[in-house]
């Protein structure tokens, strides 16, 4: 590829990033909503200071040997940005290693970048991990931190928050059993503040779009009055307004979904804007920084490479 072509690609990447827009399109036409366990007053926009800092991103390390470019392979830059946040925990949103999850690729590309945080990493797998049979490289690399291949989902406590790491590869795992486990787990751990994360987003304006198969996970979380859902898969950043499992705005009882597929792998463009999408960005690499507080949370997108961008705000627990 010529220098002129590379310069053109870089310019296109920056132009698309700077063209990120905010929108609030009308909700989809649905007539049935999943019932909520209880209702509450509309949540205020501010929360107390302090709390536990975590960072989250998916779609991270390019295959070994590829150099960084304006359009991708920025896992070293995002790893340096993670280090600067001093997080208590690092949440992986899947597709942590490309183009498959072979163990040698994890060791050659992921390990020198995001691998330095493994002792505080809580992973989930993406579809690219399963391009290696049974996601064997992923489970061998993360060991006990990834739970067991026969039940690759788990939960844990961080500060006052209950966190749930799920597996959205429903062609490879039994998502019906997973949804049943999730309902039981949420009933057993009735924390005031709950965050769940996995790879495939239920709602997305990105290149891959939303995934209906994870709808039962949304149903369980909504009924349990959870706060946040984090996903990857689409190589962009997108934040949705509070919404119900059908994607309709619900400022009283809704969950907030954030897609953070900006960990370093090449970015991709948006397609059709999803209902209730509040802000969208592509062409910038970084991660979501969350401050988890006893009664709420604050979020900020931390820019690492590409066109400068940030998004920040706060919410309260139910």
Image: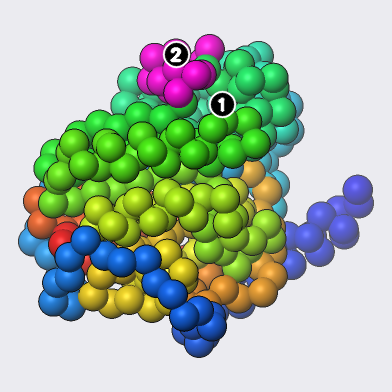
Q: Nearer the viewer, mark 1 or mark 2?
A: 2
Would you name the residue on which mark 2 appears? 143
Q: How much space separates mark 1 and mark 2, taking CA atoms?
A: 15 Å
Rendered view: 318 above or below 174: below
Highlighted range, magenta: 140-151
Q: Residues within 10 Å of mark 2 (few under 14, many from 20)?
A: few
Q: Nearer the viewer, residue 195 or 303?
A: 195
Rendered residue at 34%/39% (across/down): 182
Numbered label attached to residue 138: none
Rendered residue at 25%/31% (across/down): 156
Q: Verify CB contact (< 8 Å) between mark 1 and mark 2.
A: no
Q: Residues within 10 Å of mark 1 (few under 14, many from 20)?
A: many
Rendered residue at 23%/75% (across/down): 252
Would you name the residue on which mark 1 appears? 110
Q: Position of residue 64 (x, y in %)?
A: 70, 25
Q: Position of residue 128 (x, y in %)?
A: 66, 34
Q: Is residue 243 left or right of residue 86?
A: right
* Any part of residue 96 in sight: no
Q: Position of residue 268 (x, y in %)?
A: 69, 58
Q: Nearer the viewer, residue 162 or 103?
A: 162
């Amino acid at each position: 590829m010529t220098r002129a072509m590379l310069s053109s690609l870089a310019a296109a990447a920056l132009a698309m990033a700077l063209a990120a827009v905010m929108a609030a399109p009308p909700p989809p036409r649905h007539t049935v909503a999943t019932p909520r366990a209880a209702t509450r007053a509309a949540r205020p926009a501010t929360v107390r200071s302090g709390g536990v800092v975590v960072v989250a991103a998916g779609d991270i390390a390019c295959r070994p040997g590829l150099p960084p470019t304006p359009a991708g392979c920025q896992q070293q830059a995002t790893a340096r940005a993670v280090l600067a946040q001093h997080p208590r925990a690092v949440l992986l949103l899947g597709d942590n290693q490309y183009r498959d999850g072979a163990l040698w690729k994890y060791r050659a590309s992921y390990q020198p970048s995001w691998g330095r945080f493994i002792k505080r990493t809580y992973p989930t797998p993406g579809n690219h991990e399963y391009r290696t049979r049974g996601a064997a490289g992923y489970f061998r690399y993360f060991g006990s931190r990834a739970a067991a291949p026969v039940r690759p989902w788990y939960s844990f406590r961080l500060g006052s928050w209950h966190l749930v790491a799920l597996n959205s590869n429903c062609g490879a795992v039994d998502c019906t059993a997973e949804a049943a486990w999730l309902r039981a787990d949420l009933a057993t751990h009735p924390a005031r503040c709950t965050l769940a994360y996995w790879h495939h987003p239920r709602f997305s304006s990105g290149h891959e779009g939303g995934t209906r198969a994870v709808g039962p996970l949304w149903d369980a979380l909504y009924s349990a009055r959870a706060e946040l859902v984090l996903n990857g898969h689409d190589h962009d950043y997108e934040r949705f307004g509070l919404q119900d499992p059908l994607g309709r705005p619900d400022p009283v009882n809704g969950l907030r979904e954030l897609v953070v597929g900006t960990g370093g792998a090449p970015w991709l463009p948006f397609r059709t804007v999803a209902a209730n999408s509040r802000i969208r960005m592509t062409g910038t690499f970084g991660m979501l920084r969350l401050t988890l507080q006893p009664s709420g949370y604050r979020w900020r997108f931390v820019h690492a490479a590409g066109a400068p961008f940030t998004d920040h705000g706060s919410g309260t627990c139910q």
